[in-house]
Image (cartoon, rainbow, N blue to C red):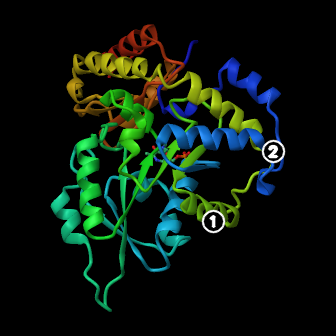
C-alpha cells in the first residue's frame, strides 16, 4: 500500500542530490571552527535572510531557545502569542532552561498579535516588574492555519518595538513558505527581525537542522549558548551539505505544496461531516474540523491510517494535514477519496 504521509513536512526524506552532497562534503571540527561546509551554509543562510551571520543548529526548538537566551537575561520577559509553537511545543524551555518569563497574548486567527495589546503589555520601568525585552512572531503561523504574516505587520511591530527598545525574534520555521505565499523576497520579510530561526528539515526536506540568523555580535553570543546546550556539533558539514542543497533546490517548489494544500482543503470541504474554508489555506498546512458525532478526530485518523493516509489529530475535533515534497497532486486526489470513503463508513 502506498502511504500518503500528511502528518507534517518534517517527515520528508533527503533528495538524491542531498545524499550525494552529504557523502562528498568537506568536513572539519565545527566546534573548533574548522568545518568549511557548515560555514558555507551559515553564510548562504545569512545572505538569503539579509543578515550579517548565521549559526547552524540541530533543531528549530534549539534555535528559538538560543535566540531567546541571547535577547533576554534571567527574569526578563518575552511577549509571545498564546498559539505560538514556542509556547505550546517547546516544553517551556525558555522558562525552564532560559529563566525567561513568558507573557502570552492572544493570537488573532491570522497569527498576528494585535499591536495595541503588545503596546499595553510592555512594562514600564518599575522595581516590581520584569523587564520586557523581546517580542516573538511566528511566520508562517503553524497553529493559526499556516498563515503567512505579511510584511506590513512586520514593519508595524518593528516601529512599535523600536519605540520601546524591544527586540524581535521570528520563529521562521516555515518562513520560506511565507515568502512564497506572499510572493515577496525572503530578505525583505526577515528585514524587521533582529533574529530569525528557519528550518531546513521541514518543507525544504533536509534531514536535520535549522539556522539562526542575526547580526555578528548576536551570532557570537548564540554560538556560546549553543555550546552549553550541547548543540556544538563536530563534522556537521555532513548535515550542512544537505542544507545547502535544500536552500539551492527546494525553495521554488514550495508553491506546489501550497497548491496541493488548497486542493486538499477544497476536497475536504465537500465531504459531509468535515468543515474547512479552502480560502483560508495560504501555505502547506490544512487544519479541518470533524463536525459530526459519528466519529472523533482521533478515531478518524486511526481509520485513515489503516487505509494508508496519515494525518495528526490536533485537537478533540480537529485534524492537521501538511503537504510536502513526497505528496503529489495525484496523492491529494487519492487521499481525498480515502477520506470520503472513511466518512461514509462511520
Ligand atoms: N513543528 C512540528 C511539531 O513540533 C508540532 C510540526 O510538525 O509542525 N517552530 C515551528 C513553527 C514549528 O512548527 C516547529 C516544529 C518548530 C519551531 C520546531 O522545530 P524542530 O522540530 O526542528 O525543533
Horizontal and vertical percent for residue 213? 53, 50
**Where residue 50 appears, x then y in whole percent?**
47, 43
109 and 270: which is toward the camera: 109
Q: Is residue 118 above or below residue 58?
A: below
Chain-order first, disc 2 or disc 1? 1
| Whole-percent x, y for residue 194 in the image | 43, 56
Q: On the image, numbered disc 2 is attached to which residue? A: 235
Question: Which picture quadrant has residue 219?
Answer: bottom right
Badge 1: residue crowd in 10 Å (few <14, some 14–19, many ≥20): some
Ligand 1 neighbours mark 1 (CB distance < 8 Å): no
Determine which quarter of the picture holds residue 342: top left
For this view, does 9 lie left or right of residue 124?
Answer: right
* Quadrant assignment, res 12: top right
Q: Residue 145: x percent and y percent?
A: 31, 37
**What element does badge 2 sit on?**
loop
- Tell me the quarter of the image containing the N terminus: top right
- In this rendered view, identify the residue nearer to me: 39 or 198: 39
Q: CA distance from mark 2 to mark 1?
A: 19 Å
83 up-or-down from 202: above or below: below
Residue at image point 22% right, 32% down: 291
**How many tags in the picture?**
2
Any part of residue 320 in sight: no
How crowded pointer 2 is (Cα within 10 Å; few <14, some 14-19, many 20+) is rated as: some
Residue identified by numbered label 1: 225
Whether residue 214 can be seen here = yes
Q: Identify the residue at image location x=41%, y=15%.
A: 335
Viewport quadrant of the C terminus: top left
Residue that appears at 32% across and 92% down: 127
Kindly give the residue lying farthest to the left in the view shown.
116
Amino acid at each position: 500500500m502506498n502511504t500518503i504521509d500528511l502528518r507534517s513536512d518534517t517527515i520528508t526524506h533527503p533528495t538524491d542530490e542531498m545524499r550525494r552532497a552529504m557523502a562528498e562534503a568537506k568536513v572539519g571540527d565545527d566546534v573548533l571552527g574548522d568545518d568549511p561546509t557548515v560555514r558555507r551554509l551559515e553564510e548562504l543562510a545569512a545572505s538569503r535572510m539579509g543578515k550579517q551571520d548565521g549559526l547552524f543548529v540541530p533543531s528549530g526548538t534549539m534555535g528559538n531557545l538560543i535566540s531567546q537566551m541571547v535577547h533576554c537575561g534571567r527574569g526578563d520577559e518575552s511577549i509571545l502569542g498564546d498559539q505560538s509553537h514556542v509556547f505550546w511545543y517547546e516544553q517551556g524551555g525558555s522558562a525552564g532552561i532560559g529563566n525567561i518569563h513568558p507573557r502570552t497574548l492572544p493570537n488573532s486567527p491570522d497569527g498576528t498579535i494585535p499591536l495595541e495589546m503588545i503596546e499595553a503589555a510592555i512594562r514600564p520601568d518599575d522595581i516590581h516588574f520584569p523587564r520586557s525585552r523581546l517580542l516573538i512572531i511566528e511566520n508562517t503561523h503553524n497553529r493559526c492555519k499556516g498563515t503567512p504574516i505579511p510584511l506590513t505587520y512586520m514593519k508595524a511591530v518593528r516601529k512599535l518595538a523600536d519605540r520601546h527598545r524591544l527586540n524581535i525574534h521570528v520563529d521562521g520555521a516555515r518562513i520560506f513558505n511565507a515568502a512564497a505565499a506572499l510572493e515577496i523576497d525572503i530578505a525583505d520579510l526577515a528585514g524587521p527581525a533582529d533574529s530569525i530561526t528557519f528550518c531546513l528539515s521541514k518543507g525544504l526536506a533536509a534531514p536535520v537542522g535549522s539556522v539562526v540568523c542575526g547580526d555578528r555580535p548576536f551570532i557570537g553570543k548564540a554560538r556560546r549558548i549553543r555550546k552549553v546546550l550541547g548543540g556544538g556539533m563536530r563534522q556537521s558539514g555532513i548535515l550542512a551539505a544537505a542544507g545547502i542543497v535544500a536552500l539551492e533546490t527546494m525553495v521554488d517548489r514550495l508553491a506546489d505544496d501550497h497548491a496541493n494544500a488548497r486542493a486538499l482543503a477544497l476536497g475536504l470541504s465537500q465531504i459531509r461531516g468535515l468543515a474547512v474554508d479552502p480560502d483560508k489555506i495560504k501555505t502547506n498546512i490544512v487544519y479541518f474540523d470533524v463536525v459530526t458525532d459519528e466519529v472523533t478526530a482521533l478515531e478518524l485518523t486511526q481509520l485513515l491510517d489503516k487505509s494508508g493516509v496519515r494525518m495528526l489529530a490536533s485537537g478533540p475535533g480537529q485534524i492537521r494535514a501538511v503537504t510536502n515534497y513526497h505528496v503529489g497532486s495525484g496523492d491529494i486526489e487519492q487521499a481525498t477519496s480515502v477520506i470520503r470513503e472513511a466518512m461514509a463508513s462511520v
